[in-house]
Image (cartoon, rainbow, N blue to C red):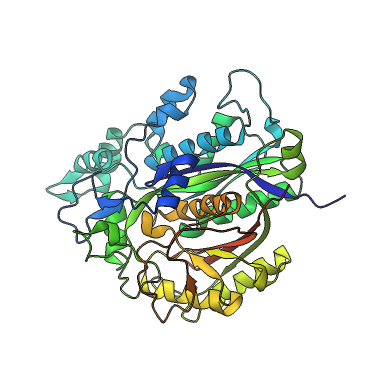
Amino acid sequence: MAERRVVITGLGPVSPIGVGKDQFLASLRSGRVAVDGIRAFDAAEFPCRIAGEIAELSCKDYVPKSYRKSIKVMARDIELAVVAADCAVRDSGLKTKGVSDGEITVDSTRLGVNIGAGLICPDLNELTFALASASNDGQFSLEAWGREGMNNLTPLWLLKYLPNMLACHVSIIHDAQAPSNTITCAEASSQLAIGEAWRTIKRDCADVCLCGGAESKVNPMGLLRQDLIGRLTRSHNDSPASAVRPFDAKRDGTVIAEGGAVVVLEDLEHAKRREGRIYGEMIGLGAGFGTHDFLNPDRNGDALAVVLEKALADAQVEACDVDLVVAFACGLPEHDRVEAQAIARVLGDVPVTSIKSQYGNNGAGSGALDVAAAALCLSEGLVPGTVNCEQVDPACPVNVVRRTEDRRVNTLLTVNYSLSGGQCTALVFRRWAG
């Protein structure tokens, strides 16, 4: 039996620069930046007061009417995943229970879900009231928490904050009964989830998978965590559009953001039979782990270099065949340097771009947005420029694409890694020629 081939047939980006494929593509072409002052909460006392937020997103517009009551137990991260899945399924032309009241065009027992998730921050208004009721003279009391505090939380409170609930809701809405999985490896989560979905289809355990990831770091705890460990720029509160500067000599940190994407991966023959649109083919995966301390990357980039080599070997392509790298780079001085040096070591003088300068770091959703951008590069003949990279840091020896170009891309590689934890991944895609 011939090895199954897996293609991308649907895109569901949900990001500060656009919700849905069309808005996202238009922003990639124009280089639109959506980093601005934080509106979700009062950030006046924080050193960094800017972020990439998604404006005016209502989850009820993206779920069946019969499912709208469930939105009450969806944290922001879950809503983002549900919206992304709806956009991806509709873009693919598939008819699932989630988008059709009549004809269903995919066997539910052959439809899988793999979603990457991050650390979901509780609603502080809910949690603070409960904690306050468990305090004695300003001191938290476990006894009072068990007696009174927990009673001030809704019985279903925890269901809003379990990382597996992103995949859970997507699976229920679209009646996906094939293998379902959740991966929680910080920024590496969504590309690892896409890789797992690819393998699920290749080993004939599903015909279609909804895969990707989502996260919102736009909350007080998300902002505080990232600032305390020195990841956020503090010098661009008055110039947010120029805050995130991948590979640039003057980069000094990133900003928090929210968003993510779901893509539809599909067995090639299944897609052909239904005459589905094909954005590109996924042909390789590399994954690994690099030991380092909590705050800093593997200084020499050895782990990431090995992962890049694994991805090329899995795809059976040579380094010289790669036309473009969609890098993770989010403006962190040391991480950008290590990533650039690993790319240069393995791939040479390949063109490299990063889209994080347009919206920041949205954690577990970041890699999936890179894959959505990669699919559009392949299908549209587009290479988005790396906004805000005015002078490439000599310590980053890569050929950074600084202005958006119309150029045919045949083979493309995406790079992704967790800022804390050491997980690294690289995915290889190629243009679909029909």
- In the picture as drawn, the residue positioned furthest to the front comes out as 406
Q: How many marks?
A: 0
Specify whether 83 is left or right of 254. Answer: right
- Which residue is drawn at the image coordinates 24% and 39% (left, top)? 125
Relative depth, front residue between 323 and 78 = 323
Residue 277 against residue 141 in the figure, above or below = above
The image shows residue 352 at horizontal and vertical percentages of: 51, 67
- In the picture as drawn, the residue positioned furthest to the left comes out as 137
Specify whether 145 is left or right of 238. Answer: right
The image shows residue 360 at horizontal and vertical percentages of: 36, 57
Relative depth, front residue between 378 and 109 = 378
The image shows residue 205 at horizontal and vertical percentages of: 73, 44
- In the picture as drawn, the residue positioned furthest to the right comes out as 1
Specify whether 27 is left or right of 112. Answer: left
- Which residue is drawn at the image coordinates 74% and 66% (left, top)? 316
Q: Is residue 163 visible?
A: no
Residue 231's quadrant in the figure? bottom left
The image shows residue 294 at horizontal and vertical percentages of: 41, 70
Q: Is residue 262 visible?
A: yes
Specify whether 378 is left or right of 25. Answer: right
- Which residue is drawn at the image coordinates 72% and 33% (left, top)? 274
